[in-house]
């Protein structure tokens, strides 16, 4: 079966993978943080791919660009939260590096994709 719509976007694919990895890794966070940092980092990570999906379904390039900008802000929020959970030792150095590498890859792809959409305005 051929991929359709947003599923064809490599940036969505990478952002989705990143969100899934954040979710899996956050299972090990302190149980007392379930409604705090755990919930917040999961929401911010999933917000990246969710906004790409919503933007892709929009009626204009300008609206799509707005959603991509929101996705980028969510990614920056997730970057900060990754630093916080690392400082609090909720993540090992290895897991932090793995997630940060993936986050950085998403950031580069999202930046390139956003520029591409902006150039089509």
Image (cartoon, rainbow, N blue to C red):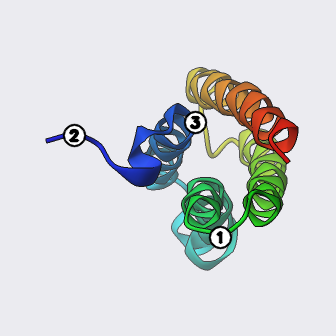
Name which residue lies at 80% across and 61% down: 70
Q: Looking at this view, name the residue that lies furthest to the bottom.
A: 35
Foreground label between 2 and 1? 1
Q: Quadrant of the N terminus?
A: top left
User: Measured from the top left, where is residue 53 in percent x and y?
Assistant: 54, 60
Q: Label 2's element?
A: loop
Image location (x, y in percent) of residue 28: 47, 51
The residue at which mark 3 appears reads as 11
Q: CB atoms at circles 3 and 1 under 8 Å apart?
A: no
In the picture, residue 45 is in which quadrant? bottom right
Q: Quadrant of residue 17?
A: top left
Mark 3 lies on a secondary structure that is: helix
Q: Which tag, 2 or 3, sits closer to the chain's start?
A: 2
Q: Which residue: 61% across, 79% down? A: 35
Taking the spot 80% from the left edge, 55% from the top edge, the residue there is 65
Q: Which mark is residue 97?
A: none
Residue at which label 1 appears = 59
Helix, strand or loop status at disc 1: loop
On the image, the x and y values in percent for residue 42 come to 58, 61
- Residue hosting label 2: 2
Q: CA distance from mark 2 to mark 3?
A: 17 Å
Residues 16 and 77: in front is 16
As measured in the structure, the alpha-carbon distance from the residue carrying label 2 to the one carrying label 1 is 23 Å
User: Is 91 displayed left or right of 80 in the figure?
Assistant: left
């Amino acid at each position: 079966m051929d991929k359709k719509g947003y599923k064809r976007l490599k940036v969505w694919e990478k952002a989705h993978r990143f969100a899934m990895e954040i979710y899996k890794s956050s299972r090990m966070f302190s149980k007392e943080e379930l409604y705090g940092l755990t919930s917040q980092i999961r929401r911010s990570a999933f917000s990246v791919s969710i906004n790409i999906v919503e933007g892709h379904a929009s009626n204009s390039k300008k609206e799509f660009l707005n959603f991509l900008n929101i996705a980028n802000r969510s990614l920056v929020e997730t970057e900060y939260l990754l630093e916080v959970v690392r400082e609090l030792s909720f993540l090992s150095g290895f897991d932090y590096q793995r997630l940060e590498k993936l986050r950085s890859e998403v950031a580069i792809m999202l930046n390139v994709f956003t520029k591409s959409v902006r150039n089509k305005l």
